[in-house]
Image (tube, rainbow, N blue to C red):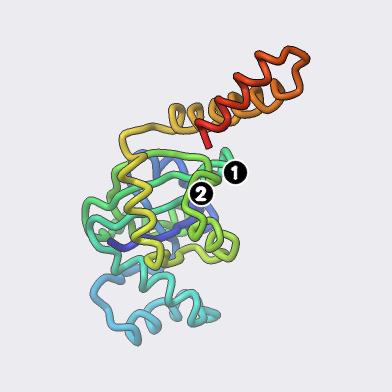
Amino acid sequence: MTVYHIRPKPHGINRESDFLKGRVSIGWPCGQDLRGLSRDELQQALAQEYPEINAHNLSQVEQFLHIEVGSIVLSPSESNVESMHLFRTVESPQYDMNRDNSKEGNPHGVAVEHIMTVKKSLLPPGVLRSLKGARKTVCNFSKHASAMDEFLEVAEHLSEEPVTAEFELQNKVRNTLIQALDSENEVVRVQAAAALYQSA
């Protein structure tokens, strides 16, 4: 399984709603289909429209064009900075000539299914560390494939509300029990201590 982190603003346009509707895309409109090109051909095609293009830009476009079916895509929410959308690709990247212009700005896209949306804080620790340095539009997170696979096995059947609600409820219960340890009632203190011990 391959894993990618893709920001939802291709060509500077917020496409979060499009991502959630099933199409994840990147920008760089240049008047032609870039699929199937070699790296040199890709660079030449993009350089005609973007003379300032560098190796980092080229790498991002190239990675997107080679996304495989079944890949996991993490995309940060623009409307809620604490949330992360998780998608699974259902086909290889496609080209839409009607979007190959400055107004639309996202001719290359890939069809996805929205798996779930979760709080970023719930993601595996390694993923969270990589997110801190994920400044580019497209980043390959495949080194975290195993961790994400395990995460999805546990969480895939849940939507954002139950996942976050369960997480927050557990914290509230634990905090309540900790406060109960200071109760003047000895029975309450003992019961709280026992409950905390069992949940540890």
Point 55% across, 45% down: residue: 121
Looking at the image, residue 147 sits to the left or right of residue 198; the answer is: left
Q: Which mark is residue 152?
A: none
Indicate the secondary structure of the residue bearing disc 2: strand
Query: Please, what is the three-letter code of the amino acid marked with disc 2?
Result: Pro
Residue 2 place in picture, x, y as percent: 31, 63
Q: Quadrant of residue 139?
A: bottom left
Residue 76 place in picture, x, y as percent: 51, 49
Mark 2 closeness class: few <14, some 14–19, many ≥20 residues within 10 Å: many
Q: Quote the CA–CA distance across marks 1 and 2.
A: 7 Å
Mark 1 closeness class: few <14, some 14–19, many ≥20 residues within 10 Å: few
Cβ–Cβ under 8 Å for marks 1 and 2: yes
- Residue 127 visible within the image: yes
Q: Which residue matches tag 2?
A: 76
Q: In the picture shown, does residue 39 fall above or below 20?
A: below
Instruction: Please tell me which residue lies in front, 179 or 92.
Output: 179
The number of numbered discs placed on residues in the rendered structure image is: 2
Locate the N terminus and report the quarter of the image it occupies.
Answer: bottom left
Q: Earlier in the sequence, mark 1 or mark 2?
A: 2
Instruction: Please tell me which residue lies in front, 106 or 18.
Output: 18
